[in-house]
Image (spheres, helix red, strand yellow):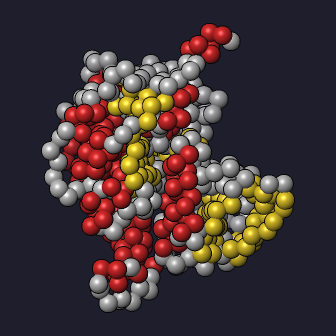
Amino acid sequence: MKPTESASSLQVPKKTQPEEYDLVILGDGTGSTLAAWTFAGEGKRVAVVERKFIGGSCPNIIIDSAKIATYFRGAERGGIAKPGSAIDMPAVLARKRRMVWGLNEMYLENFKNSGAELIFGVGRFIGPGTLEVTLPDGARRQLRGANVIISTGTHAVVEPVPGIADAQPLTHVEALELDEVPEHLVVIGGGYVGLELAQAIRRFGSKVTVIERMDRLLPREDDDVAEAVASLFHDERIEVLLNATVKRISGKSGQSVKAVLEQNGAEKALEGSHLLVATGRTPNTQGIGLELAGVEVTDRGYIKVNERLQTTAPGVWAIGEVAGSPQFTHISIDDFRVVRDNLTGGNHITTGRQVPFCLFTDPEFARVGLSEQDAKAQGIAYRRFKIPMKSVLRAHALTETRGFLKAIVEIERDRILGFTAFATGAGEVMSAVQIAMIAELPYTALRDAVMTHPTLVEGLIPLFSSAASTHKVVETRRAQISAA
């Protein structure tokens, strides 16, 4: 110490003390937002850390605009003189942005009313239950939660195909921001996102080609579903290349792109104006300090959770897609309920829950419970009920008779094991069956119900009144395993 200095004059850096919260949430997904509003509304001190966006990127507003365009083009079938049908993509985009803006305003109002603190910044763990947040201005805050929920979601996978990064392809996020109709959209991937956007963009007037590496679309679904979707795309002149693998890409999306494919052992080239990558999603778990918090991940990078959605770190939970849950908003909401109940002394688990889903093509594909493929794989004998939508009177009134309704029912009892619909309004009809499944009602309760005429749900009466085909199982899965 210099003679002129005193101990009191030395500047000792102050150690930053974390701000204490009852609950800290990393990531503003649907389920985590509900958690924030709920616990803050009960008087808990809650903070939510989000990088940039509030809410999700649901494409349904774009899909609806595409359906409206189809109505205009088919106006003559309703006896209406055909109006002009030019697509104003900036107007479509403006409509989507208005919806997003309105939802964002509602979200912000709910944060204000509940008392939950929304912090925009980049968050990462620096220790057990403790996060450091880098704010947009570079300042930093440390937050410590008695409990922490991770809800960082997933992002689109862009596979390491030579030239694809330089092509700057669209993901679903950029596709929903298009302000022009692509001349020719090339879609890599025949999953849900790829199929929904392929049909929507086609209906806006674009030429569309879908590249799928499997030998059919929707390979996890029953043959009749895959065939129905393939037939729909054929009729709408959407080119589908199956058994096709992209080997290299050149050019730039939005200008001109060229994809070199290998299909059934032969190489071919495909040129387009825009490139959309829809080959799956990967979890947002990198660079957020999970190892410092004691949170382990699976071999696929998802956060390890048990059936109560607890991670490997005490007091840390994970919900939604980052936890490996099915990638649907309604499952994120149910994940919230699981964590909420467990944080308040309950014992709520995810095991055995129903996972309904809907592919929002037009017509829609919806399913809840077992498919026929599932039942056969599990060695379950069942009765199948199936009718074409032509048997549903409401479908005729709407001139929407494409598709079918199908249900499988347990042989020994009359319990509904699964329901599948490829039809207009399929998601709504499915929900009626799901409620019956939740209540464990026999299929006869729907068969004998008095339903409003004419409605699409009324189609469940002819469905369950139709003659069922019986699928007996010669050798159950359990027997196969025992023999092995």
Measuring 51% from the left and 20% from the top, which residue is drawn there? 312
Is 197 placed above or below 440 here? below
Is 247 placed above or below 414 here? below
Is 300 placed above or below 196 here? above
Drawn side of residue 241 relative to residue 455, left or right: right
Number of marks drawn: 0
* Image quadrant assignment for residue 309: top left
Residue 28 visible? The answer is no
Outermost residue to the top: 482
Is 21 placed above or below 69 here? above
**Residue 297 at x, y = what percent?**
58, 28
Outermost residue to the right: 266
Measuring 56% from the left and 21% from the top, which residue is drawn there? 474
* Towards the viewer: 354 or 59: 354
Measuring 48% from the left and 68% from the top, which residue is drawn there? 200
Measuring 33% from the left and 68% from the top, which residue is drawn there? 399
**Residue 10 at x, y = what percent?**
52, 33
* Towards the viewer: 243 or 399: 399
**Residue 322 at x, y = what percent?**
50, 37
Which image quarter is the C terminus in?
Answer: top right
**Residue 359 at x, y = what percent?**
45, 52
Outermost residue to the front: 467
Drawn side of residue 174 relative to residue 41, left or right: right
* Towards the viewer: 274 or 38: 274
* Towards the viewer: 311 or 436: 436
Which image quarter is the N terminus in?
Answer: top right
Drawn side of residue 394 relative to residue 60, left or right: left
Residue 433 visible? The answer is yes
